[in-house]
Amino acid sequence: MKPTYEPVIGLEIHGELLTNSKMFCSCSADYGSAPEPNTNICPVCTGLPGAMPVVNKKATELAALVGLALNCSINKHNTFARKNYYYPDLPKGYQISQYELPIAEKGSLKVNDGSENQLEVRVRRVHIEEDTAKLAHEKNYALVDFNRAGVPLLEIVSEPDIRTVEAALDYATKIRAILRYLGVNSGDMEKGVLRFEANISVRPVGSDEFRTRTEIKNLNSFRALVRASQYEIERQIKIYEEGGTVVQETLGWDDVRGVTTSQRSKEEAHDYRYFPEPDLPPLQLLDAWIESIRSQLPELPEAKTARFISDFGLTLSEARFLTSEQTLANYFESVVAKSKSPAKTIHSWIAGEFMRYLNDSGLSIDDVTLAPETLAKLIDMVTDKTIGASAGKTVLTELFKNGGDPAQIVKEKNLLQMTDVNAIQEIVTKILNDNPKEVDEFNAGKETLFQWFMGQVARATKGKADPNVAKELMVKGLEERKK
């Protein structure tokens, strides 16, 4: 009988830090706004002989903030090292990084394993390093742009505690959310400011061995992380089932073909020949400084999710949706504060029509100019039956496009909900009288026609009839015609 395999996954996450200057020099870290390639550079970030690096204080603060958010211990004494490997995007022939004594280590993060079970993933280390230059590959040569070289980079390394692709996705999603909540990284993976690397091996279920692993480099989307991990797991299982041996190597991901491709044999730490960076003294962090950084921690996604559940009566999935982005969570709370409607009703509007408009328009929550109090006023008008839900959608679209006051838009478009029972009764009676065939079919058991009747009411009243009143009268009218 063939063994059943399970994956063993560890993730390395690289995130560029949002600082004004580079990690070891005063050049701007905003390389994306540089007018031309190789203009945002100096002797330090291009590795010219004799140039001396200086540690970026802000980058150090942001790195410590991330470490604390991930429940890590901060190393009061931490050092920089030279990571030696020769590649065209490293002007010095080595990368200044941290190795033996990173700024933070031994943390943890709880994630979902895909079956609503909570899994604690240990965070091995959080360390600071510098980003590489950017290569543009042509047919027979490569062009190097050093504008990105030296940008502060944070690396977050997990232990190999992840056992499902779903858990890997949840871990990566939560790390991105935390970095955005802290304001240390924009999370814009399309621009390459956040990149994932997955270390993957497989083993028989029940085994505690660690088999040969491969590393998939530079995954710049959640979709790529999921697809690449799934493919690599299946590839390794197939190798073992056929009696082969998995080779330890570094892989790339071909998103078009949907396959991993070999790049080079996988290096171990000794291959990089780490040694202490002679031009940078160790960082000595005081307890008071660490506590000052800790005081800057905001309410993080998991804590906010728990509060939304307890304070607003939301489900776990509803709360997680709202807290996935700090801007969205803040917007929701602002609407709740201005509205008389239940929080769950507000969630339904934001998760429904609000997000649908953003998605259809290619906008993000950060692009929204609709004031929370304006949305609150609109939702309250639907809740108190001043207008119907259909009319509310119409008003919301108008607010997004042109702004304005919900009440004024309702007045101008004549969208006030019809609540006059006698008027609605006349319309229901006329529809039933005009459609005797459908009435007989409904009473004979074709119950799906009920929605057709309600659609006729909506058409006759242009969607303005109170749906609850209309439904009650329609049920009563059909029942009377059974006798």
Image (spheres, rainbow, N blue to C red):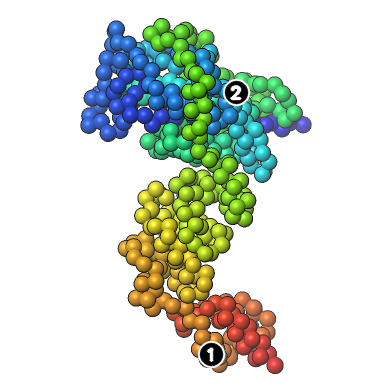
The percent coordinates of residue 132 (x first, y second) are 37, 22
Disc 1 marks a residue whose amino acid type is Asn
The percent coordinates of residue 382 (x first, y second) are 49, 70
Q: Nearer the viewer, residue 128 or 241?
A: 128
- Find numbered disc 1 in the image and state the secondary structure of the residue it sits on: helix
Quarter holding the N terminus? Answer: top right
Horizontal side of 251 relative to 26 (left or right) equals: right
The residue indicated by pointer 1 is: 422
Q: Nearer the viewer, residue 349 or 115?
A: 349
Q: Which quadrant would residue 139 be assigned to in this image?
A: top left
Image point 58% across, 29% down: which residue? Answer: 71
- Find numbered disc 2 in the image and state the secondary structure of the residue it sits on: strand
In the image, residue 252 above or below residue 85: below
Q: Earlier in the sequence, mark 2 or mark 1?
A: 2
| Badge 1: residue crowd in 10 Å (few <14, some 14–19, many ≥20) | few
Image point 33% across, 15% down: which residue? Answer: 91
Quarter holding the C terminus? Answer: bottom right
Image point 58% across, 42% down: which residue? Answer: 303
In the image, residue 7 above or below residue 115: above
Cα separation between marks 2 and 1: 70 Å
Disc 2 marks a residue whose amino acid type is Lys
Q: Nearer the viewer, residue 57 or 172?
A: 57
The residue indicated by pointer 2 is: 106
In the image, residue 302 above or below residue 444: above
Residue 55 seen from this side? yes
Residue that sits furthest to the right in the current view: 1
The percent coordinates of residue 471 (x first, y second) are 59, 80
The mark total stands at: 2
Residue 260 seen from this side? no
